[in-house]
Every structure is written in structure tokens, then in C-alpha cells.
């Protein structure tokens, strides 16, 4: 059959590429404003309540691999399809540097399995260059975004507590759940070390915010997707209501190839390959909104070349793909002897930590410019593949109930009893910090590699600077302090300079942003302060790409707030016939 | 290892075709349904079509020989034996889990196959018979050499590496089984109303919730009420 390009559907008001946090919010806001929307998603439909897709409340033995991560990177029951590697869709790296890119091809994208940590950026986070001279300021301030954060809080729901910390703005919170046992112990240690341990801020419904979603029932499995929609995922909280409006056509399995433009330089729609029939299609629209993820949207722009846009669409500045930055990450585990032989009770709680540590120090007194927050783990979790591994590194370290030391390792009834005794006695700390955005950390089009659809792929170049390495060193010291203060034993070897203090490979924290950054100067930025491309007035980018800096926070809540803000701007500009 | 690579490795592993698994000795009391690793067709656990296909293929293949399965069964029951609380790892179907796991994660195939052979050769040299035919005393005498990494002598280092892997897989297989989870006393994975650490546990550790935080935390009776905010 000859290859031809077919047009799909009518001419839409808006075509949105990607159905994650940014795309889902745009679909909801634009469709509720009465606009006709085409929502394109590269993966399949997904609804966590669909019995064929649901993994919530399954037992480990229902999986023959007991939840091992052989086919899904975060385990058999994790909701995310896709992962670090996708068959037929490679990416490459440059000059011996590393970058790991997590892609989740499905309705809702990566919001289906994330940690639900929903932190607002603070006043300093938008103007950090003015504070320390590094990177750039955003063209907008916290006050510009605050009203949108407020509305996202009420629309989606996030629990937390009002703390009055300047750079950790409070919001409209749902009541937080009480801390678990190990969390109380960490709080106690934090108090003695002057490290704040405060209620976590997670987008999980301790109380309902609307009639479509039931409150959390404390199974601790948000990463599996919630059958009662008690947590936030774009699929259940944004795409689903958007579909109800009747104004949205959802195209799944639609891998977008490029953004189309006309002679005047306006975007006219997108072209895509349909994965089910491998035919080429076009969708036409008055406005194009990219929300395919920071790197995927940059790839799309760079691949959308025309005589008018020889450097890629909206890339006269040459900035597309540059200033890529992911959160830093380092972690450490600890064993808490007093938590041995615990009384058993159901302490699953919500799907994540009930308390956390926001950044608490003054960087002027430190050898790195930006802060980090600390995420906490521990408790009597449901065993999964990997449970019990490494007992030989644990059961020789501490005496038995009779006080006698045992030989590490072993077998038989004594060993069996050790697994019971050590259940729920280990904790974990993970630091997540801000990396300073740099022009020389970037993704670009690999000149010689295409994916299975013939689309040129991304090539990454990314290194950590002294700021991130020194920050990781500080994290390691903090983790050890906390573990020792709790009377615990830090597990494994402390990561040293040889491993950059355990700093994770760039991309690994899955907070990558910055590739289409916003700014007032079209020579130094891709979009303006309303996420609108400087060079193409009817093209918007509402994923993490427009972030100028990513703060020591998880990006999702800010993606949602900015997408809400940009979407309302689109509605008003259309009304004014400006685009 | 990516999927294509693991499937390739799998094809190599499946050369060792044998009869249906019969390697359960009388003492291990393996029940019929425990011969399966879990995740059967009746167990829908949210697979994509590609994942379903892969599971099916892995289950249809066979890696370990009957003799090897017999040794694995004896070893798992020695590592986690039956006691007054619960049955053994063999009772919990761990051998079938290990068979599935080496097909799912082929990097474990060689260390386990080679390790089982190492075990048998040692027994042949010292007792003139393979491991499974040795007396329990002979079996545990050998395990005493390889089950304690910190005191094991260098000539047993390969045995230690093998046994550590066996212990890990046995423990994971056992505690992710229905029998093992019950043994461990894990009581979650069901709808619950989390209202904090039980009072007696707080007392045991000398801890308490801060007075000033109590009005802020979720009151469990409010859970069903729609949230509203005063502006």
C-alpha cells in the first residue's frame, strides 16, 4: 500500500500533544471553556479502575515474578507503562556523559505512578539568580502563580499543614495523616538536630474534594493507580472529566512526528503515525499545545524544520533542548535496632511518607548554591520481590532476643525467625535537590539515529557541577546524622568522592525540565511568561520544558499551575482574536 | 538487561527440556497448586497484551532438570523449614517460583545451575552420593561451611556465593507467598482507616503525638466529608 497522509477529524480549536499533568490540565480547562480539543497520546488508554488494568490490592503471589521489576522498572504492579528503555524508541548520549530518560506512554503519562509529592515553588525559587547569581530568574514571580496553585489545590486536593516557612508556601490543604512510628522517631531526631520534620504534602485525598473521587483508604499503593481515584493522576482527575465535557477527541497510540506550519509561520496542527495501523495522519487545529514532556516536546520542535524554521520550530534563539536539568538524588538506608520484634498492625497509610524534611539551611554558609528536601521511607510494608535479600549483611550486626550475637547469614529455624524479627526495622532517606540549569546540559537531535517510526531521536549531554556534587556530600552527612541520632546503624558503605557521593545518574529522579525555557527575551528563551512560543503565537508548551529553574521541589504541582494559567490565557486570546 | 536480550538468553536456557516436574520428595508435602509460581490465567493482575504474552511463554518453558528441581526443593526446605508457626519454603511453592525467576531473570541461571553442580560434586567427593541422597547431617554439615559468609574459609567461597543467592531467592519466594505473608504477620493490603500508631505501641516507645498537631491531623470521622475551605 502506498504511503499517504490522511487527515483525521475536523479542524479543532486546539490540538494537545501528551496527556500527562500539563496536557491533562490543558484538556480539562480548554474543553470546559467549550473549545473543540484533539488530545493526542502516544500510548494506550489507561484507567486505574479498569479491572483489566488495575493492580491495586493485588497480592505479590498473583504475579509469578512476585512484583520483580523485569518488565516494569518500578515493579510488576507499578502503573507506569514504558520505562528507561522502550523497544524501538532509543535515545543516545554524547561525549561519554550519561542521561537516563523515563518515558511512560499511556493516558496520564508519568502521573500514573509518581510519588504524589506536591510542593509549590517558593518566592526564592522563581528569582534564584537574584539571590545567588546562578542560572536565571523566571520572568514571573510566586505572586503571579499563587492564585493558580490555590486553584489546583482545591481542584485536585493535597494534604499538608500550614507551617509559615517563607520558601515553602502553604496552600489550601487537606488534613495530613498522623505520622507512622518510624516517622515519629525521625521527627524526634530532627528536633534534636534542628532539622525540620513536617507533615508531607501529597496529592492524596484524606478527604474528598468532589463527588467523582472517593477518599483514600490507606493501602499505600498510589504508584499502582487508584481504583477509587483517591489520588491525583492526570488520567483519572483531568482527562476523565475533560472527556465528559463531550468536546474532546482522544487519539491514543498517536506518536506525533512534527508540528505543521503554514507560510505565515503559524502552527496549523501536527502530523503523527498511528501505532495501530502504522499509517500517517494529520490533525489540524487553530492552536497547538505541546505537553509531551520536557524532552519529547523539545524533540518535536527540533524535528519540525521548514525553510522558515531551519533550526527547528520556535528555535530562533537556539535555546530549545538547552538548560536541561533534573533533580539531584542520593540516598542511604539505616537499621533501627529498637524497631526489631515490632508489634504487628496495619501501618500502610497513604501511598508515601506522612512527614518529610523541607530545605532548612542557608546556602550562603555552604559550599553549594541550592538546597534539597529529604524523603523518608520505612515501615511494615507488604513484601515484594527483593524482600529478605541481604539478611547476611544484617543478622550478624545485632544480638538476638537473648542478647547473644549470631553469625551472619545462616539457614533453618533461626534464620526464619530473623526475617520476622527484622520486619519493619529498616528506614531509608532520599535527598532530592536543585541542580543549577546550564546551557551546556542539553538534548539535541542525534544526526544519525532514528526510531522505528523514522523519527530522529534525542542525544543527551549532561554533567553534574561542583554544586550538585557538594550538595550530595551534604545529603550523605545529613542521612548519617539522622540515623545515628535515632540510635540506628547506617547500612552499606557511605558513598564517597569516587561515586560523587552517591549522586544518581542525571534523569534518574524523573524531574527533567528546562528544555524550552520561558523568558522575556526571545533571544534567550523559547516561550514567554504565558508559555506561548515567542516565534509562533498559536503554539504553547505546558509541560516541564518552560521551567527556568526547577527548585528543590517536585515539578508536577508547578506544571499543573502553569498549564492552568496558560490554558486560560489561550481561551482569552482566542476570544480577543489575538491568535 | 532489555527484553530482547533476556528473551535471547531464555532461548538458550530452554534447551534443557525434561519431563513434568516431579522433584518433590515426600517430606516436603508440596500441594498441587504450589507447583505453580503464581499469576495464573485466573489471576488478572493488570497485564498489557505484550506482558501477558511474555508470562505465557516463560511459564511454558522449562529450565531446571528434574534432578536440579529436587535439589532446589530440598535446599529451600532446609533454608526455611516448617516450624510451629508455618510450613516450609517448599510447602509455599518456592521451588516453582525459583524456576520461573531464572527464566524471567536469566542472569540467575548460570550461578544456580553451576552452584547446584558444585554442591553435588562436593557431596560425591566426600560422601559418594549427590546432595539429595545425603543424610540430613551430611547436608547440614556442608551448609555450615557455606551459609556463614563472614566465617567461611576461602575454599568454600564459591559455595558461599551460591548459597547466598539461594537464601535470597528462597526468602523472597517464601515471604511473598500467602503462607509467608501470614507467617510474617503483615496485615495490610486492604481498605483501612489509618488513625495513627496504636496507643500501646506509642507507650512502648515512649512516644506521643504532639498536642499542637492533633487538631491539624486528619480526624478519621471526617474522612467521608467533602472538604471546604474558608477564604
Image (cartoon, rainbow, N blue to C red):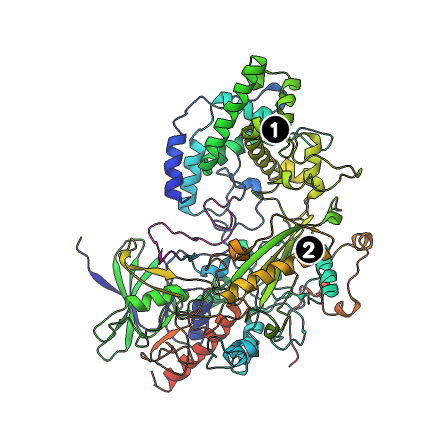
Residue A462: name its quadrant: bottom left
Does the magenta segment cover residue A14? no
Return the x and y of residue B34 as percentages of the image width and height: 57, 30
Does the magenta segment cover residue A86? yes
Numbered badge on residue A483: 2
- Residue A215, compared with residue A168, is above or below; it is above
- Residue B74, compared with residue A136, is above or below; it is above
Numbered badge on residue B153: 1
Total count of labels: 2
For the residues carrying marks 1 and 2, which lies nearer the camera in this image? 1
Q: Nearer the viewer, residue B147 or A110?
A: B147
The secondary element bearing badge 1 is classed as loop
Q: Residues within 10 Å of mark 1 (few under 14, many from 20)?
A: few
Numbered badge on residue B186: none
Q: Hey, which residue is sitting farthest left in the picture?
A: A2
Q: Give the magenta-colored segment's residue range.
A: A68-96
Amino acid at each position: 500500500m502506498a504511503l499517504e497522509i490522511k487527515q483525521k477529524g475536523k479542524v479543532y480549536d486546539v490540538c494537545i500533544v501528551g496527556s500527562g499533568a500539563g496536557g491533562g490540565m490543558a484538556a480539562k480547562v480548554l474543553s470546559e471553556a467549550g473549545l473543540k480539543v484533539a488530545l493526542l497520546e502516544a500510548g494506550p488508554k489507561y484507567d486505574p479502575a479498569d479491572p483489566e488494568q488495575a493492580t491495586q490490592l493485588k497480592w505479590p503471589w498473583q504475579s509469578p515474578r512476585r512484583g520483580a521489576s523485569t518488565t516494569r522498572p518500578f515493579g510488576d504492579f507499578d502503573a507506569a507503562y514504558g520505562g528507561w528503555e522502550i523497544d524501538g524508541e532509543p535515545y543516545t548520549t554524547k561525549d561519554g556523559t550519561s542521561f537516563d530518560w523515563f518515558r511512560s506512554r499511556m493516558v496520564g503519562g508519568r502521573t500514573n505512578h509518581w510519588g504524589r509529592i506536591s510542593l509549590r515553588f517558593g518566592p526564592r525559587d522563581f528569582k534564584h539568580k537574584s539571590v545567588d547569581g546562578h542560572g536565571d530568574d523566571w520572568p514571573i514571580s510566586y505572586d503571579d502563580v499563587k492564585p493558580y496553585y490555590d486553584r489546583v489545590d482545591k481542584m485536585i486536593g493535597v494534604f499538608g499543614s500550614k507551617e509559615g516557612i517563607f520558601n515553602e508556601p502553604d496552600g489550601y490543604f487537606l488534613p495530613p495523616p498522623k505520622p507512622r512510628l518510624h516517622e515519629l522517631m525521625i521527627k524526634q531526631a530532627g528536633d534534636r538536630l534542628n532539622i525540620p520534620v513536617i507533615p508531607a504534602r501529597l496529592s492524596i485525598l484524606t478527604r474528598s474534594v468532589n463527588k467523582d473521587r472517593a477518599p483514600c483508604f490507606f493501602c499505600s499503593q498510589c504508584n499502582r493507580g487508584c481504583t477509587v481515584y483517591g489520588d491525583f493522576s492526570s488520567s483519572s482527575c483531568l482527562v476523565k472529566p475533560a472527556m465528559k465535557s463531550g468536546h474532546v477527541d482522544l487519539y491514543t497510540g498517536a506518536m506525533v512526528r512534527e508540528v505543521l506550519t503554514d507560510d505565515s509561520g503559524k502552527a496549523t496542527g501536527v502530523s503523527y503515525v498511528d501505532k495501530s495501523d502504522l499509517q500517517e495522519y494529520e490533525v489540524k487545529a487553530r492552536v497547538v499545545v505541546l505537553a509531551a514532556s520536557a524532552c519529547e516536546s523539545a524533540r518535536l520542535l527540533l524535528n519540525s524544520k521548514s525553510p522558515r524554521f531551519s533550526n527547528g520550530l520556535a528555535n530562533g534563539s537556539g535555546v530549545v533542548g538547552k538548560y536541561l536539568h533534573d533533580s539531584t538524588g542520593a540516598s542511604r538506608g539505616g537499621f533501627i535496632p529498637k524497631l526489631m520484634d515490632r508489634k504487628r498492625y496495619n501501618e500502610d497509610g497513604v501511598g508515601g511518607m506522612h512527614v518529610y524534611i523541607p530545605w532548612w539551611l542557608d546556602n550562603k554558609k555552604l559550599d553549594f548554591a541550592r538546597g534539597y528536601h529529604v524523603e523518608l521511607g520505612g515501615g511494615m510494608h507488604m513484601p515484594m520481590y527483593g524482600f529478605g535479600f541481604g539478611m547476611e549483611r544484617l543478622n550478624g550486626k545485632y544480638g538476638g532476643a537473648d542478647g547473644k550475637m549470631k553469625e551472619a547469614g545462616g539457614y533453618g529455624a533461626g534464620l526464619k525467625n530473623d526475617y520476622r524479627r527484622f520486619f519493619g526495622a529498616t528506614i531509608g532517606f532520599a535527598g532530592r535537590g536543585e541542580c543549577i540549569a546550564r546551557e551546556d546540559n542539553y538534548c539535541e537531535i542525534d544526526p544519525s539515529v532514528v526510531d522505528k517510526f523514522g523519527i530522529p531521536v534525542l542525544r543527551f549531554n549532561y554533567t553534574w557541577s561542583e554544586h550538585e556534587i557538594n550538595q550530595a556530600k551534604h545529603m550523605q552527612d545529613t542521612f548519617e546524622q539522622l540515623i545515628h541520632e535515632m540510635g540506628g546503624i547506617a547500612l552499606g558503605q557511605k558513598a564517597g568522592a569516587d561515586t560523587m557521593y552517591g549522586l544518581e545518574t542525571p534523569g534518574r529522579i524523573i524531574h527533567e525540565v528546562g528544555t524550552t525555557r520561558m523568558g522575556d527575551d526571545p533571544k534567550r528563551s523559547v516561550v514567554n511568561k504565558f508559555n506561548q512560543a515567542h516565534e509562533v503565537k498559536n503554539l504553547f508548551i505546558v509541560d516541564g520544558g518552560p521551567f527556568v529553574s526547577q527548585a528543590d521541589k517536585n515539578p508536577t504541582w508547578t506544571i499543573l499551575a502553569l498549564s492552568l494559567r496558560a490554558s486560560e490565557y489561550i481561551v482569552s486570546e482566542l476570544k480577543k482574536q489575538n491568535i | 538487561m532489555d527484553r530482547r536480550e533476556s528473551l535471547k538468553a531464555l532461548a538458550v536456557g530452554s534447551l534443557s527440556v525434561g519431563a513434568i516436574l516431579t522433584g518433590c520428595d515426600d517430606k516436603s508435602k508440596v500441594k498441587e497448586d504450589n507447583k505453580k509460581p503464581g499469576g495464573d490465567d485466573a489471576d488478572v493482575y493488570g497485564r498489557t497484551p505484550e506482558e501477558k504474552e511474555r508470562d505465557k511463554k516463560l511459564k511454558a518453558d522449562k529450565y531446571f532438570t528434574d534432578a536440579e528441581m529436587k535439589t532446589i526443593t530440598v535446599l529451600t526446605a532446609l533454608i526455611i523449614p516448617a516450624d510451629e508457626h508455618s510450613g516450609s519454603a517448599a510447602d509455599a511453592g518456592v521451588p516453582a517460583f525459583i524456576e520461573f525467576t531464572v527464566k524471567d531473570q536469566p542472569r540467575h541461571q548460570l550461578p544456580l545451575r553451576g552452584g547446584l553442580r558444585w554442591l553435588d560434586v562436593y557431596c560425591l567427593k566426600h560422601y559418594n552420593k549427590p546432595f539429595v541422597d545425603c543424610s540430613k547431617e551430611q547436608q547440614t554439615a556442608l551448609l555450615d561451611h557455606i551459609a556463614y559468609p563472614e566465617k567461611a574459609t576461602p575454599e568454600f567461597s564459591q559455595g558461599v556465593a551460591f548459597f547466598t543467592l539461594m537464601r535470597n531467592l528462597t526468602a523472597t519466594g517464601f515471604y511473598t507467598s500467602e503462607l509467608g505473608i501470614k507467617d510474617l504477620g503483615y496485615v495490610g493490603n486492604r481498605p483501612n482507616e489509618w488513625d495513627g500508631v496504636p496507643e500501646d505501641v506509642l507507650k512502648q516507645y515512649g512516644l506521643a503525638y504532639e498536642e499542637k498537631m492533633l487538631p491539624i491531623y486528619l480526624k478519621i470521622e471526617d474522612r467521608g466529608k467533602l472538604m471546604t475551605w474558608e477564604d
